[in-house]
Image: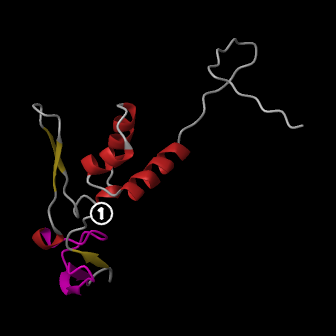
Amino acid sequence: MSLFFYFLLSLKNAKNGFLYVLMYKVSDTKICPHCTASTLIKNGFTANRKQQFYCKTCTKRCIDFYTNNGYGKEINAHIVMLIKEGMGIRSMARVLCISTTTLLKRILFIAKGVQSPPIYSGQIYEVDEMRTFFKA
């Protein structure tokens, strides 16, 4: 998605630490999110009763206002921060206004990107609660 589709303006409130995001609808800007042309026309409604637009230039469709909060650009950073603070899954989902299943999928996606630290030979390492299993 381009900046023309969602013109994001983030404001940080110093008093309570919440992040506020202002978003403008496609119907306000009349600019296509795919090709940035101003040739959008109304093209019916979706199953969720949201206004749908059609671009005459690139022949693609877009929705007036997307409400999927689970896949925002900054959501991964917020999830990592809340996990480090020790917040539970349901609490994080409630604070971020996303479902618990979406939150769990995002946590798994973030976990796949974490790289293990390199282990060098000849070094001394301290291991806590090491478990070994022997196959008999």
**Residue most toward the front?**
136
Considering only vertical position in the picture, is 74 above or below 63?
A: above
Considering only vertical position in the picture, is 68 above or below 32?
A: above
The percent position of residue 110, horizontal first and vertical second, equals 47, 45
At 27% from the left and 68% from the top, the residue drawn is: 33
At 20% from the left and 69% from the top, the residue drawn is: 65
Identify which residue, 15 or 58, lies in the foreground. Answer: 15
Q: Quadrant of residue 51?
A: bottom left
Q: How many marks?
A: 1
Is 59 magenta? The answer is no
At 64% from the left and 14% from the top, the residue drawn is: 126
**Residue 110 visible within the image:** yes
Q: Amino acid at mark 1?
A: Asn
**Residue most toward the bottom?**
44
Instruction: Name the residue beneath numbered marker 1.
Output: 68
At 33% from the left and 80% from the top, the residue drawn is: 60
Quick one: quadrant of the C terminus? top right
The percent position of residue 57, horizontal first and vertical second, equals 28, 81
The residue segment tinted magenta is 29-55
Circle 1 sits in a helix, a strand or a loop, which is it? Answer: loop
Say how the picture is coloured: secondary structure
Identify which residue, 96 or 134, lies in the foreground. Answer: 134
- State left or right for residue 113 relative to residue 62: right
The percent position of residue 55, horizontal first and vertical second, equals 26, 81
Considering only vertical position in the picture, is 31 above or below 84?
A: below
Is 46 magenta? The answer is yes
Q: Quadrant of residue 25?
A: bottom left
Quick one: quadrant of the N terminus? bottom left
The percent position of residue 52, horizontal first and vertical second, equals 23, 81
Considering only vertical position in the picture, is 132 above or below 42?
A: above
